[in-house]
Amino acid sequence: MQHNDVITVNDLQLYLASLSQCKDEIDIFTSVHNVINPLMKYQDCIILQKESTQYTVVATSNHDFYIDKWPQCALFSQALKNGFSLCQNATEELEFTYLDERVKRNTKACLIISVELEVGHFLYIFTNVNTVGHDKVAQSAMIKIYLQQVVFAFFNFNRLDDQSNKSVLLLDNLTQLSILFKELASEWFWRTDSEMTFVSVNNIESEDNTYAQLFLNNKIASIITHKEQQNIDKWQRFSKMVEDCEDFNNFEFEVNASQRLWVSLNGKSQFDELGHFIGYLGIAKDITLSKEREVALESARLKAEDASKTKSKFLTVMSHEIRTPMNAIMGVIELLLDTKLTVEQRQWLDYANSSADILYGLITDVLDFSKIESGTILLVNKPLNVKLLIENIVGQLHIIEDSDDIIFSISIDDQVPTFIMGDEFRLGQILFNIIGNAFKYTRSGSISLRVYIENAQLNFEVKDSGVGIAQKDLALIFQPFRQVNDGINRKDEGVGLGLSISKNLIELMDGTIDVQTQLGLGSTFSIAIPFDTALESEVENVSSQNCSTLSVLVAEDNRTNQLLIKAFLEKLNHKVTIANDGAEAIEFMKLKNFDLILMDIMMPTMDGLTATQFIRNELLSDIPIFALTANAATDDKASCFKVGMNKVLTKPIKFETLKASLSGL
């Protein structure tokens, strides 16, 4: 409060003391009249509480103004916004619509003052006011504090009155009402001197006034906990505010009490008639319960983070344990398919290869979803051949989904560049999922893929004449682990991650995906992705390959994987030396020169990371080292690069993947 307020601090103390002695509503309104009328003449006083878009009557000095609901209109909104508003003629304002015509005729100028408490917003309507000096009353900080306490007094009176009328049969409810009353009384009035010593603590709860016992005649610094004392920056900032006589709001701290106690202070600096600082006046609130909720929420958050880390660790371990045997299974099948086979043997191997691909796809989907969920998935940006990518995807789908009942057509607009910058693997994954779904849900009819440029974006439109999707199920299709038909007897394979992963990858590329569908009439998926055309120099750099014969050292402890990788490399005309662990690989390095090392990460005796560190730091060799790992997580790849490896190959390794990785060496 500034020193020129309409009432002084001492006046306010006396008015609040008088208010505490009131025994009924008449006494309270008499107290209000004694305070306000000398400053501003008025006739009646009505107190309203805001509820949504209407107001209810808390109390009124004249029952003529008691109506069930007061409407919310411009006059009340102005009071809430500015702190007060003045109505020159009540009959012209919508707020007074429901009053009796006689009452409206006798109601002239009205002053509306708003006050805000934890329990809500309240409006005071003073009728037939003398408009001279009304603005000083409406803007007085001391008057606002007094009017706030009047609301509490009415609440106190009304609740006590309700309790006195309760039947003996409702004694259990009296306990709950008592608790509610204490919560309403959790705000209390305080005052300090210029040295920040609490000289007054007034709480509605008179018995066992814990706040007065703790605060009265003490400074904040002497009643805070040891933990609070360690927060030096916080208290230095508070001391600076006090030194500058600044007002403060919601300053929270823990009090050193027998039971856990947190309070929040709102303080306003006070000055005497000469403008000298004389202390603070304000409201305090017990926030112990809200702090306990914060602690509980933080504990829940930490538990959730631990659970997420545990899940990620589990997926990493499962990735390694599943990918290692999958590498051998898929590799051996691929080698067998390259040998002379009977028709029946080739058919069996095709079945086995198809099932292995499905299983590998499920594993990849789960791991990709985990990466997306944890925010660790990264996109590469290098030249890719759009038309070749589409041809490869379509070729795979023709093999998998070969059917005489489906007509599949492709349309690529001439404006689509041959090479663009992007992530070939992830774009292929998206298109494979969307087009694959079209084949999955179309038994007969047509499927079309249209590729075109629009609004500086590369657009893919996949249209099918399949079963379509009901409008009620559209919200499900992009949700993880959800399918339109997710019962145990469903016909379609998968774990319901394809569309969810595709949508997340598209959004990582700053693109969008949309679907237009009708049950029984097919679906159209539209994808739009921003793109940059690849420069000719970048394309030439990627396209250049060196296919010379290499001398390759393979460090791998798994016998099956040894045979598989050796067969792949020899198929590419490379010379292969096998080491059973990292230590044996180092011994081979000392005896012979190699062009490349394929290093498994997890091996007995000496693992791949340790062996690579020795080769880089002790042997001082810069030979290219490619990691062979079943751990696909970003952190695992980072560990490989950290010790000096040049590339990471994730198991199960396919022949084409290995061939592409060796190009350029």
Image (spheres, grey):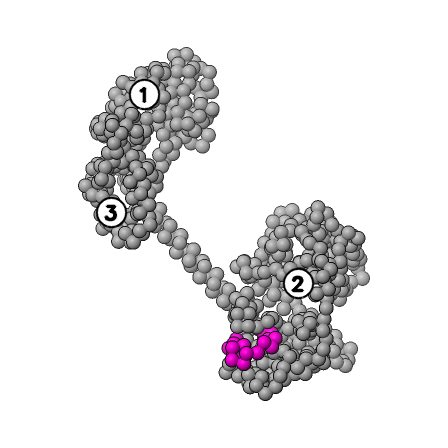
**Residue 284 to residue 235: above or below:** above
Circles 2 and 1, Cβ within 8 Å, touching? The answer is no
Q: Which residue sits furthest bottom?
A: 591
CA neighbours of label 3 inside 10 A, class few (<14), some (14 to 19), many (20+): few
- Residue tagged 1: 61
In the image: residue 50, left or right of residue 662: left
Q: Position of residue 104 (x, y in %)?
A: 41, 14
Q: Position of residue 127 (x, y in %)?
A: 36, 17
Sooner in the amino-acid sequence: mark 3 or mark 1: 1
Camera-nearest residue between 367 and 605: 605
Q: Give the structural element (helix, strand or loop) at label 2.
A: helix
Sooner in the amino-acid sequence: mark 2 or mark 1: 1
Query: At 38% from the left edge and 18% from the top edge, which residue is drawn?
Result: 110
Camera-nearest residue between 495 and 508: 508
Q: Position of residue 518 (x, y in %)?
A: 70, 47
Circles 3 and 1, Cβ within 8 Å, touching? The answer is no
- Residue tagged 3: 221
